[in-house]
Image (cartoon, rainbow, N blue to C red):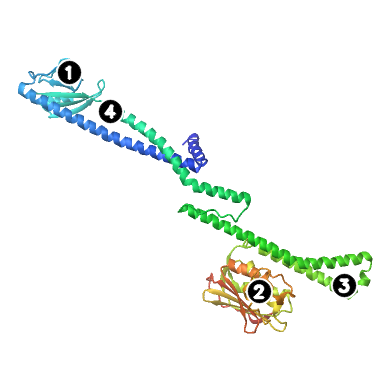
Amino acid sequence: MSRSGARVPRRLTRWWRGRSLRTRMTVIAATAIAVSVFVAFQVASELMDRKLLETAENQLHADSRVLATNAERAGLAQVQLPPYPGSGRLARVILPDGSTRTPAGQPELPPVSEQARRVAEGASTDLLESTDWNDGYRVYTLRVGDGAVQVADLADDSPINEFGFGMLLIGLLCMAGGALVGRTVARTALAPIDRLTAAAVHVAQTRDLDADIPDEGGGEIRQLVQSINDMLAALRDSRQAQRLLAEDAAHELKTPLTSLRLNVELLIRLDRRGTLDSALPAESRTRLLNDLGAQVAELSTLAAELTDLARGDVSDESTELIDFADVVVAAATRAGSRAPDMEIVLDVTPVWVSGRPAALQRAVLNLVDNAGKWSPVDQPIQVRLRAEGASAVLEVDDAGPGIDAADVPRVFDRFYRADSARALPGSGLGLSIVQRVVDAHGGRATVARSARGGALLRVDLPAASPPTARPLFTAGKDTAAR
C-alpha cells in the first residue's frame, strides 16, 4: 500500500474519533439501514431476474411447442405463419435445406447459429441461446421433422431497472429515516449521560462533593452513576480526612509552638535588657535550654510523623518477599540504639511475608517505642514473632500500667492520647502509622492486656511461602538488646 493509501484510513480514524457519540450512533444507524437495503435489493433483484427469466423461458417453450405442433400437421414449408402484429415474440421456421421462413412484417432475427443448424439436422432436440445482436434476443430452437422452429423474444431489463430505481428511492428514504431515527434514539439513550455530564461539570465547577448525582436509568447507566457517586463519596471522605488531619495537626502543634515561642521571647527579652545572667542562673538557663531542645525535637518528630501519615499509601518502595524476623530484629536494634536504657528481649522465628521492608520496620519501631514509654526501666520489653496458621503474628509486650478499657477503641486513632499519656513525649501518631501500614499489607492490629499487666499490641500479617528452604533461625531468642 502506498503512503497516500495508508493516510486515508488514518484520516478516517481521526475523523471518526473526533465525532460525538450522538453523531456516531446516527452514522451507524444510517449505515446499517443502507447496507440492509442494498443487500435486500441485491437478493430481490437476483430472485426477480431469475423469476422473469424462468417465466420468459417457459413462455418460449410453450409458444415453440404450439408452432411445432402446427408444423408437424401442415409441414414446415406449408405451415401458416400469421403476420407479425407489431409486438410480442418472434417466430421462424428452419427448412431442411437450411433456408428460413418468417411471418410477414416481422423484424429481422439474428442469423441461424451453427448450434441451431445442428438441432435442425438432428444433433439434439432443442436449444436455448442468447444473442447480442441488436438489443439481444433469447432464442429457443425446437426440432420438428427434418427442420426446426424457433421462437425468440427481446431480452427486456426494464422491469429490473424499474425495480432497481424504486429500491434506490426506497433506500434513500430509509437512510434518511434511519439517520432521523438514529439521531432520536441517540438523543433519548444519551439523555441520562447528558444529565450525568452536567452534574459532573457542576461538581467540578463548584467543588461541591456533597451533591450526589441522581440515580436514573438502568443497566450500564445505573452502574456508571453509582460508580461516580462512590467516587464522590471517596473524595468526600478524603477531603474530610484531610480537614481533620489539618485541624488535629494545628491543635497538636499549638502547645509546643506556644511553649517554644514563650521561652524564646523570654530569652530575647532578658538578653536585650542585659539581665540574662542575673535573671536566669546557670541551672535555670540549662533547664530552659533543655526544654527548648526537647520542644524542638518534639516538633521535628511530629512534623516527620505528619509527613509520613499524610503520604498515606503513596510510597516509592516496592513490595518484595521478606523474612519478617529480619525486619523485627532490625527495628529492635534501632530502637535499642536510640534508647540505651531500654531493654528489649527478642523471641522471633523466621516467617516470610510479602511487603515493603522500610514501612514494616517503621511500624515495628513505633510499637517498640510506644512500649518503651510505659515499661518500667527494670522490666524488659518482650517482642515475639511466630507463625500461626496462615499468619505472621508479632506481639510487643510491656510491663506498664496497661491500657484502660475506655481507651482501647481509640488506641490507633490519629493524635489520640490517653489522659495518662498527656505528660509523656509523643504526638499520638505512632500507633496510627502502625495501623495504616498494617492495613496496607492486608493485616490486622489489635490491643489487649498482657500477662504482666501491661499492654499487649499484636499485629497479624498474611504469611507467604519462603522462596527456598532455609534452616530454622531464632533471632536473639531469649536475649536482650540494649
Residue 358 disc label: none
**Of label 1 and label 2, which has the lower sequence position?**
1
Which mark is drawn over residue 85?
A: 1
Q: Quadrant of the C terminus?
A: bottom right
Label located before the other in sequence (3 or 1): 1
Say if mark 4 contacts mark 3, CB within 8 Å.
no
Q: Which amino acid type is shown beneath numbered disc 2?
A: Leu
Which residue position is annotated with label 4?
159
Q: Amino acid at mark 1?
A: Pro
- Give how far across and how far down residue 8 sits, in percent: 49, 36
Q: Residues within 10 Å of mark 2 (few under 14, many from 20)?
A: many
Q: Nearer the viewer, mark 2 or mark 3?
A: 3
**Residue 395: x percent and y percent?**
61, 77
Instruction: Work out whether 464 lies above or below 32.
Output: below
Labelled pair 1, 2 in contact (Cβ < 8 Å): no
Say left or right for 348 vs 68: right
Nearest to viewer (mark 3 / mark 1): 1
Looking at this view, is 226 or 349 the one in front?
226
Drawn side of residue 378 relative to residue 261, left or right = left
